[in-house]
Image (spheres, rainbow, N blue to C red):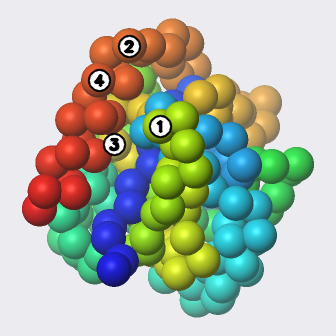
Amino acid sequence: MKNLIIETNLFKGSVNEDASGRTLVKGVLQRSGAENQNGRVYPKNILEREVTKYQQLIKERRALGELDHPDSSVINLKNVSHNVREVHWEGDDVVGTVEILPTPSGNILKELLRAGILLGISSRGMGSVSNIGEGKVEVGTDFELIGWDFVSNPSTHGAFMTPMNESVVKNIGTDVCGDFCKAESLMREIITELS
């Protein structure tokens, strides 16, 4: 049975504007092969397959994400805050460039980032998991990536966003929130599984 699977990476980096005034951020969106704070491991071959499929959404400018995760696998257009412009691999990391859109949610996101609020960037997908021991689970081959959303609670270790160019507007969050985020992530996972 497929369930909604959510993973969050700590967002740390800079807000930049391109020549047309669009707000952009760049950094790690997802990590393969490493256990995150939710105890999940994403095999690289599964993420590679999904990132390849996601390229079509990017090409069509439909790689949309929301501010906060909904309880649904459907992208809710009234909550869209950003569009993923490109993704690529750097070792085991999926790295991407994200454009913050001038929507109500996008404007909130932009101002939170400019204010230095520590946020996470979180994948949303559907799939199953299997127990691989010691409290760890592995995402199954039926996993389908929906996209990435900006959220308040990080769960992946060491995934940081970096400046896109020298025109840095504001540096973003420099501290990792530690045990609090682990507890919050576990509570979110339990609530999601009970839903």
Q: For this view, does 91 lie left or right of residue 166?
A: right
Q: For this view, does 161 lie left or right of residue 156?
A: right
Q: Nearer the viewer, mark 1 or mark 3?
A: 1
Task: Identify the secondary structure beneath mark 4.
Answer: helix
Residue 60 place in picture, x, y as percent = 58, 89
Q: Which residue is mark 1?
A: 135
Query: Looking at the image, is mark 1 or mark 3 earlier in the sequence?
Result: 1
Quarter that holds the C terminus: bottom left
Query: Looking at the image, is mark 3 or mark 4 earlier in the sequence?
Result: 3
In space, the residues marked 3 and 4 are separated at their CA atoms by 15 Å
Q: Amino acid at mark 3?
A: Val
Q: For this view, does 180 lie left or right of residue 28?
A: left
Relative vertical location of residue 121 with respect to residue 10 in this rendering, above or below: below
Q: Residues within 10 Å of mark 2 (few under 14, many from 20)?
A: few
Judged from this view, the residue extending furthest toward the left is 195
Q: Nearer the viewer, mark 2 or mark 3?
A: 2
Relative vertical location of residue 111 with respect to residue 193 in this rendering, above or below: above
Circle 4/circle 2 CB separation < 8 Å: yes
